[in-house]
Amino acid sequence: MPRSGIHNTRKSPAAADCRWFLNARTAKHIIFAVAGEYWEKLCRAVGLEKFISYVQDIQAFGLEDYMPDPVETRRKQREAVTALTSIFLGKTRAEWMPILMKADTCVTPVNEIDELFDDPQIIARKMVLDIDHPTLGKVKQVGIPFKMSETQPEFRHLGPLTGENTEDILLELGYTKANIKKMKDAGQINFARE
């Protein structure tokens, strides 16, 4: 089992300023940014203002050897991470999220699949839709991930049922209705259930 603590996400330049916290007791994750103002807001939100000046050292996770004093950078990282870990373990993710959101930190929970459908951001962005299915009733479908200011994409329909387009496709391929009927009667093809 992974241990509780602050972990580095530096796998690519795009992730350079993000860290994640895992509370191993609850197995719930939070991911947060440590760039400039967000590090300061995070430190203030959790009462660790003395670490605000460590911003460059915290951002240097994985790049310590390029810092003017790598040993000092690592010492500051350990000190801040130890203090943050201790603070974060004092509350659950559900307790931390409102505190961190109110402080305008750049933070988000890392949801499990079953939590996804109730996430306020997912709901607000219509990332999960309830769509009418012809045989199953309402089904959940992933929404359109990008939003545009003038032309909003929309979800028009579910994919076809198995066999729904079989006859049309066979006709396009040159089969006659008589050939299609023979194949259907012989059990070689199926059509969608009516």
Image (cartoon, grey):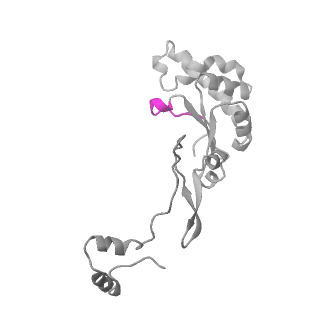
Given the current orientation, which residue lies at the most extreme front position? 150
The question of residue 14 being in magenta is answered with yes
Task: Give the image quarter of residue 56.
Answer: top right
Q: Position of residue 42 (x, y in %)?
A: 67, 28
Please name the residue shown 66% across and 22% down the image. 40
Segment colored magenta: 6-15
Q: Is residue 14 above or below residue 173?
A: above
Q: Is residue 145 above or below residue 15?
A: below
Q: Is residue 178 left or right of residue 133?
A: left
Q: Is residue 177 left or right of residue 92?
A: left
Q: Is residue 19 above or below residue 111?
A: above
Task: Give the image quarter of residue 191.
Answer: bottom left
Q: Nearer the viewer, residue 56 or 126?
A: 126
> Can residue 15 be seen from the camera position used here?
yes
Please name the residue shown 27% across and 79% down the image. 176
Q: Is residue 28 above or below residue 190?
A: above
Q: Position of residue 165 (x, y in %)?
A: 39, 71
Q: Nearer the viewer, residue 4 or 120?
A: 120
> Can residue 75 be seen from the camera position used here?
no
Q: Position of residue 6 (x, y in %)?
A: 60, 33
The question of residue 159 being in magenta is answered with no
